[in-house]
Image (tube, grey):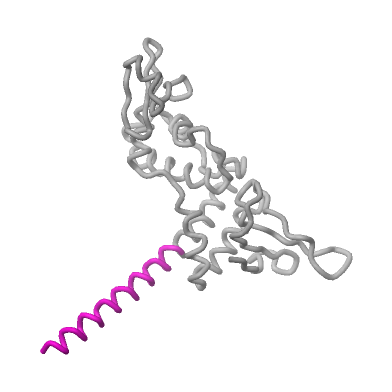
Amino acid sequence: MRLEFPSIINSDTRRFIYDSDKWDNAPVCSYFLVEEKRTNSEGWHYPVPITTNLTAEYLASLATQMIENDDLCESVCYRFERAPNTDDIEFAAKVVYNTKKSRYYSKELHKISAVRSKQYDRRYELVDDSYNGSPQGVLNILYDGGSFDGLTKFTYSKAVYDWFYASRKRHKKFSMDEPAEVAGLTDSWDEGRTITSAWTACMVALQAWKSKREFKHSMETFKQRAMVAKLGS
């Protein structure tokens, strides 16, 4: 799917593109492109992947399109929902390095073991000193050496951030920067909050789309059952 739409901040000089057929490496997301207007002539520069400084502006602009475009929501939803579940986060928080003995963990099985033979079991990994139960330690396990773009890192960081905040009474010694800072999208707390707000707007648009889809399905089911009941009476 390809969709062009204006920036909600700089519509005269900048427009954005969502293109689900793009698979290039990108700092935020390969689907998220920007075109800048030429300064000395009419026309636009060739579209390129957005850089991190445009994350909030792009997401907010995208959200305004999502709230009115069901096809766009269906296309983009998995990119926003690609995040670890609560069980995975809870398990990763329990994987803590022990200086006295080697231990091994399995993300697949959600198990931790000190049995040395586990080092030969491909389902298990060695618990090293980067795993300390902190938010970053949890992310190290969840990333599992994978190469993620900025948007995916943000969704992971946001999920971990929310989990630690919800369980802050049990994890008072740990603190965490804004998810956008952790994901490398910004080094500013204020900008990080702005990115989170824009991302949340996209999530609200997705929830509205899902609710509308569920409403339509429920009404269709009702009509079918009502028709059957009417014919049977």
Q: Please say whether residue 125 is one of the residues in the magenta stretch.
A: no
Question: At which x and y percent is residue 191?
Answer: 59, 48
**Residue 119 x, y percent position in the rendering:** 40, 19
Measuring from the top left, give residue 35's x and y in whole percent: 73, 62
Above or below, 36 relative to 143:
below
Side of 61 relative to 201 (left or right): right
Q: Which residue is painted at 32% across and 33% down in the image?
A: 109
Task: Give the answer, above or below, for where 111 lies relative to 35.
Answer: above
Image position of 224 (left or right of 7): left
Residue at 51% across, 42% down: 178
- Image quadrant containing the N terminus: bottom right
**Quarter of the image that includes the C terminus:** bottom left
Q: Quadrant of residue 12?
A: bottom right
Front position in the image: 52 or 111: 111
Q: Residue at x 38, y 29 (%)?
A: 123
Counting from the top left corner in percent of width and height, residue 149 is at: 58, 45
Q: Nearer the viewer, residue 93 or 178?
A: 93
Vertically, is 162 above or below 109?
below
Main SS category, magenta section: helix
- Magenta residues (range): 206-233
In the image, what residue occupies the spot 60% across and 40% down? 184
